[in-house]
Amino acid sequence: MSARKTKPSKKKDHFEPQKDQENRYFFKLAFWITLAIVSLFIVFSSIQIGIPSDEPIDNAYGEASLDFYTSFGRDTSFADLEVFGQEFKYQKYYGAGFEVIAAALIPEVSSSTHYKMRHLLVSFCGIAILLFAGLTCKILAGWETGLLAIILLSSTPTITGHMLFNSKDIPFAMGFTIAIYFMVKSALTFPKVRPMDLVGLVLGIAIAVSIRIGGLLLVSYFSLLLAVVLFFDRNARRHFLSQDQSTRIKLALVTVSVVILGPLLGLLFYPNFWVEPGQHVWKAFNVASDFPARITMLFEGELINSTSLPDYYLIKSLCITLPVHVLTLVLVNLILLPKLIKRYGASMVSFLFISTFFPIAYVWIKDLEIYNGWRHLLFFYPTLIVLLSLSLREILFLSKRRVFQYLIGGVFALLVINTMVWQVLNYRYQYAYYNEVLGGAGKAYERFDNDYQQLGVSEAVKWLIDNEDEITDKSRSEPIQIASNNAYALNMYFDTSALNVKFGRSGVAKWKSRDWDYAAMSTIFVRPEVRDFVFPPKDLMYLEEVDGFGVAYLVKRKDRNDIRGQDALLAQDFNKALDRLSRAYEYDPDNADVWLSLGYTFASIRNGPEAVRFGKKYLDIYANSWEANFIIGLGYLHNRDYKNSEQFLLTAMNLNPDEDKIKTNLIQLYTESNQPEKVKVISDRLSGG
């Protein structure tokens, strides 16, 4: 196919600014130097962070997928993946494009080194996003625009933070960014098709599809691009129609080949596609559209489920986590759209605009389940940055008002520097960034999710290993018990055998009632009022902070009267239990678990008023505790206050309908208060009738 012939234009070239050779060289050099500096920062940061709570699942899936391929399909353990003693039966509908390659490349090393190498590979994918987004801007509007794209991307903490560890969304976004780059290149030479551009396009589509089935969206993007080029670009349309029929057929066949080959190569990285090729794609789409897991999040000060998010969740998440300079450019971009269309053509701008905002609109309109902000939509962001970079170029390089240029450039530089300083100071937690709209991350964490991957817990444990002699004492025979709400991941990251430690799983509720020597706790999945009561706890050793907000707490147990009191209570030695628990209460009056144990103890010795007092103290913090309601109900029962006793015992039964001792005490209540009908109802429930 011959190249499209065009007459020299007297106007400025749409896709290459008319700069002198010296300026072009300067911006090209600045582009590569900036990319190198940002890349070093990302690589360094990626090997410094600990283990995200979800990563062992992805790692296990990669190893199981590798076993499938190396056994030529005989090992199908990927289909019934089990991690942490839990089954992840829907994992097989994710692509293993990154995971299986990581499993194949990483040699036998220690657990922590293994995960650092995974993070390193993810960082390479992140660098590729920066590179191809920058190169897309370069072919559209020169090296200076490519430089702006790298600056805008690298000063967006949410995406650079995920470049440190996120092995799903970052490789997926990389595939999209590569594919968009080669689509734009193909559009600029259409109808001439360069073989290497087609190879790059197929590769980008394959990478995206190999991670998530949603990568098939790129097929629609490619079709959209061809349609808008033929519709809006008169020269391209005329040149295409002037080709002989055989040439047009060849072009159509090439297009079809790309559309088929890219997705097919991507699907090969789904072990389950080999097992059930006829059903896999459809099932994967269904899982992606209606994600079966239910994720708890803190949003606007309330714990909510991912299935019951407000309609504005995605839009608000974008507004509070994108840097102010990016949000400003979004508005500027809308204002400058007519100018961009005039300069770069309606076909190119409409393609970039639709491919940027379609995913957001689709998720919003279809009410798809998302969680953890907009991390599942990271793939749209590089294309948005391309659009914003074109707009910023209009202001900084093409405006005829020098004062205006310097003013805007100065403000933009200050905003970018402010964000980047935060990124450097909080490099581990970039992914959990909030902008100044909410007063910064520290303020936002009071009402929104903070370090939801619990990276801070790893840092707390590292501090413990480095600073507590007891941990490194080789003469110690008994393992040290460390409680954590990220224990599963910690067991897979640290060498527990060499350290002679054991990580035990514990949520924030009742964490002090478990027997441990140290506790490393994050603050996720906790209502703000509970979090603010529990943290900071007594005997705090180390605090991991972001903007003055604690994201992880390390505690050493210095008093064991609470544990000994619980043991005595279980042994029904109530005098000993009361003595030990009273000492524990004196040592730490804010230990809510001691309140609960004291409530049980007083109820057991029929001290109704004290049982009610301690039960209500606990209920003030944990409003949905069936145990607190049960203790209060028992206390009122011992006081013969049957009305109040019934109220709290029924609430306890509604909260925990399988607990027989609640029903037993309700039967006693109704017997003592002479209510035989209710005795029969509860007796029937107790017997399963």
Image: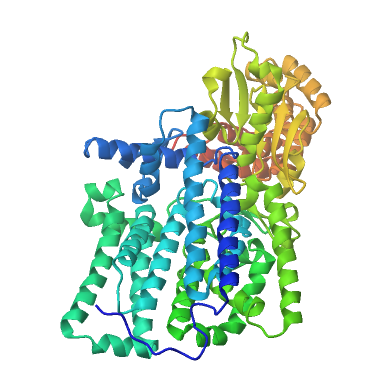
Tell me which corner region of the image, top left, top right, bottom left or bottom right, holds residue 47: top right
Could you say where residue 246 lies in the image, as x and y percent from the top left? 16, 80
The single residue placed furthest to the left in the displayed view is 246
Residue at coordinates 58% horizontally, 47% vertically from top-left?
Answer: 40
106 sits to left or right of 682 = left
Tell me which corner region of the image, top left, top right, bottom left or bottom right, holds residue 617: top right
> Is residue 236 shown to the viewer in this render?
yes
Could you say where residue 128 lies in the image, as x and y percent from the top left? 47, 55
272 sits to left or right of 234 = left
Could you say where residue 79 lies in the image, as x and y percent from the top left? 31, 42
For the rendered model, the colour scheme is rainbow
Residue at coordinates 31% horizontally, 49% vertically from top-left?
Answer: 269
Could you say where residue 449 lies in the image, as x and y percent from the top left? 64, 52
- Which quadrant is home to the N terminus? bottom left
The single residue placed furthest to the right in the displayed view is 586
Judging depth in this view, the residue of 463 and 525 nearest the camera is: 463
Judging depth in this view, the residue of 161 and 675 nearest the camera is: 161
- Which quadrant is home to the C terminus? top left
Judging depth in this view, the residue of 537 and 216 nearest the camera is: 216
Q: In the image, is residue 411 above or below residue 594?
A: below
Q: In the image, is residue 58 above or below residue 169?
A: above
Q: How many marks?
A: 0
> Is residue 360 shown to the viewer in this render?
no
Q: In the image, is residue 214 above or below residue 37?
A: below
Residue at coordinates 76% horizontally, 22% vertically from top-left?
Answer: 581
